[in-house]
């Protein structure tokens, strides 16, 4: 069969949990992509300038990073994990519903900060829970988990598009999915930027068209509402709601009983290993864990280098989604603005398709091989974009390829590092935090360089960052080998200690047998 029967049995046994965690990641994607196409309408709604509305985006990204850092605290029990997911998903629906009432940029920034905190908690807990459930088989399910981010990111702009203002206050430009749309013109400081800003102010003063974008936010709030309900139903089914006890649990079939027996036999060892190395938790709890003392340098370097790889690659994703429009409308390509707006949509669509394609690939190939191909493919793609920098056709092709190669790096890296560390330590929290930090930092850094050096530096920055990420990945492979040698040497030493003890025990048993024979 195309999929191993054991994987199918695992999924059947944990289908309710898995589908619930996938659904909350749909909320994550829905929330991360709606700001771009609605930014001009929100700017008019809050009577703010582009520089002022920037703090709204920064507030969301910064609090997403904080939420990712502290999210591991809620993993200690299933009740705390599901309760945190329920509250976070419900907060996202509430934020969608109240955004039309935020007529001040400070109030809107606070609302986005709360949503970013909820997104960060969802990001960490969903990853940790899937890794905990499937462990060495988690690669396939992590790919599917991150597919739902791209799916939500595609749905959100499609919902918003019919309600955006094409004239008047909104000044809709047709760019559907750019997350940091406000950076495009502000950082370039070009005549196009001045024209757009002037047009926005003049249309606002004239009041020619009243925006109806609030309907889009209410629709997204309703679409997201089944997600917290699904989490609440899972809590009810797991008998985690004291006032609503569920019925008797269903009977397991013979395959699930066999797997239950196998996991029951391995369970104490797994729990003991998690207690020895701290298990999965927040970064702060990892740093305070006394059991990490005495571990080899390779253990910590795997965390650091894995986080650096995702810092680079997720930074490229954020920067490319945000500034490919700016690059496309500038010389020498000089695409029409509406045509350039499709590039970000193609990029998100390629990421979604790449994550869907990676689900069967992660079953057939090891994560380290997929990481090697994806990183090398991203470097080659950006290099070809640099070579054919005047070709608008290859810009569309390269955008699609870049999205495909970058799409599955995060779930592959998560599965790879957790497998190296034998699901000890805090790899999930470190990687999620590093990825969020990279996306936030790279957007600001690349935007500043484009402003000072020109649009061509956009691809040059991507090439440099991708090469640094690949070099760091090679270092990760070396420390993986060192850590494997350390584990091999430790196991040999423990075996050498056990052998003399066993021989001594056997030797003491032989005289006793001789004495018994003499007495008889």
Image: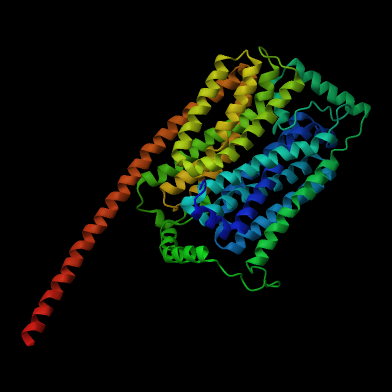
The residue lying toward the viewer, choosing from 184 and 325, is 325
Instruction: Specify whether residue 98 is in view.
Output: yes
Q: Where does residue 238 sit, x and y in percent of width and height?
A: 62, 66
The residue lying toward the viewer, choosing from 111 and 141, is 141
* Figure label count: 0
Q: Residue furthest bottom?
A: 520
Q: Which image quadrant for residue 204? A: top right
Q: Residue at x 48, y 26 (%)?
A: 467
Q: Residue furthest left?
A: 518
Q: In what quadrant of the picture does the C terminus appear?
A: bottom left
The residue lying toward the viewer, choosing from 9 and 132, is 9
Q: In the figure, 447 relative to 81: above or below?
A: above
Q: Residue at x 65, y 39 (%)?
A: 150
Instruction: Specify whether residue 434 is in view.
Output: no
Q: Where does residue 85 sit, x and y in percent of width and height?
A: 65, 55
Q: Where does residue 202 sit, x and y in percent of width and height?
A: 88, 23
Q: Residue at x 60, y 32 (%)?
A: 317
Q: Residue at x 70, y 71 (%)?
A: 244
Q: Left of 184 or right of it: where is 147?
A: left
Q: In the figure, 313 relative to 291: above or below?
A: above
Q: In the figure, 248 relative to 284: above or below?
A: below
Q: Where does residue 42 sit, x and y in percent of width and height?
A: 81, 36
Q: Residue furthest front?
A: 1
Q: Which image quadrant for residue 100? A: top right
Q: Left of 119 or right of it: where is 138?
A: left
What is the image's colouring? rainbow
Q: Which image quadrant for residue 160? A: top right
The residue lying toward the viewer, choosing from 123 and 169, is 123
């Amino acid at each position: 069969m195309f999929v191993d029967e054991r994987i199918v049995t695992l999924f059947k046994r944990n289908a309710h949990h898995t589908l619930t965690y996938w659904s909350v990641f749909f909320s994550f994607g829905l929330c991360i992509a709606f700001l771009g196409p609605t930014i001009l309408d929100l700017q008019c709604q809050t009577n703010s300038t582009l520089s002022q509305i920037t703090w709204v985006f920064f507030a969301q990204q910064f609090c997403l990073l904080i939420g990712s850092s502290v999210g591991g605290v809620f993993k200690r029990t299933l009740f705390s994990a599901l309760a945190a997911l329920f509250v976070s998903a419900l907060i996202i629906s509430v934020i969608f519903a109240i955004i039309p009432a935020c007529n001040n940029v400070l109030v809107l920034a606070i609302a986005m900060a709360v949503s970013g905190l909820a997104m960060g908690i969802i990001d960490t807990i969903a990853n940790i829970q899937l890794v905990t459930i499937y462990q060495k088989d988690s690669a396939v399910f992590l790919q599917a988990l991150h597919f739902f981010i791209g799916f939500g990111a595609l749905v959100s702009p499609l919902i918003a598009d019919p309600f955006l203002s094409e004239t008047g206050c909104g000044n809709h430009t047709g760019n559907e999915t750019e997350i940091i749309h406000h950076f495009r013109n502000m950082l370039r400081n070009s005549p196009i930027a001045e024209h757009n800003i002037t047009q926005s102010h003049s249309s606002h003063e004239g009041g020619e068209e009243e925006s109806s974008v609030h309907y889009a936010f209410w629709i997204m709030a309703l679409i997201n509402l089944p997600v917290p309900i699904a989490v609440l139903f899972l809590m009810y089914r797991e008998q985690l709601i004291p006032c609503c006890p569920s019925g008797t649990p269903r009977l397991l079939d013979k395959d699930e009983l066999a797997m239950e027996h196998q996991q029951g036999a391995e369970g104490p060892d797994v729990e003991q290993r998690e207690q020895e190395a701290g298990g999965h938790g927040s970064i702060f709890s990892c740093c305070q864990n006394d059991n990490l003392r005495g571990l080899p340098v390779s253990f910590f370097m795997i965390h650091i280098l894995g986080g650096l790889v995702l810092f680079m690659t997720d930074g490229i994703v954020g920067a490319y989604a945000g500034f490919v429009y700016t690059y496309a409308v500038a010389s020498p390509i000089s695409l029409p603005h509406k045509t350039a707006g499709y590039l970000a949509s193609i990029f998100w669509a390629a990421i979604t398709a790449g994550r869907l394609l990676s689900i069967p690939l992660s079953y057939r190939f090891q994560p380290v091989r997929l990481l090697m191909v994806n990183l090398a493919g991203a470097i080659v793609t950006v290099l070809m974009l640099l070579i054919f920098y005047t070709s608008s056709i290859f810009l569309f092709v390269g955008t699609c390829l870049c999205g495909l190669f970058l799409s599955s790096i995060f779930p592959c890296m998560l599965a790879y590092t957790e497998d190296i560390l034998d699901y000890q330590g805090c790899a999930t929290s470190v990687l999620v935090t590093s990825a969020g930090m990279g996306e936030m930092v790279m957007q600001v850094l690349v935007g500043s360089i484009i402003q000072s050096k020109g649009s061509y530096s956009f691809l040059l920055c991507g090439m440099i960052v991708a090469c640094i990420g690949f070099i760091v990945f090679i270092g990760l492979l070396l420390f993986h080998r060192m850590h494997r040698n350390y584990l091999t040497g430790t196991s040999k030493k423990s075996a050498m200690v056990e052998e003399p003890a066993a021989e001594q025990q056997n030797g003491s048993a032989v005289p006793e047998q001789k004495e018994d024979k003499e007495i008889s």
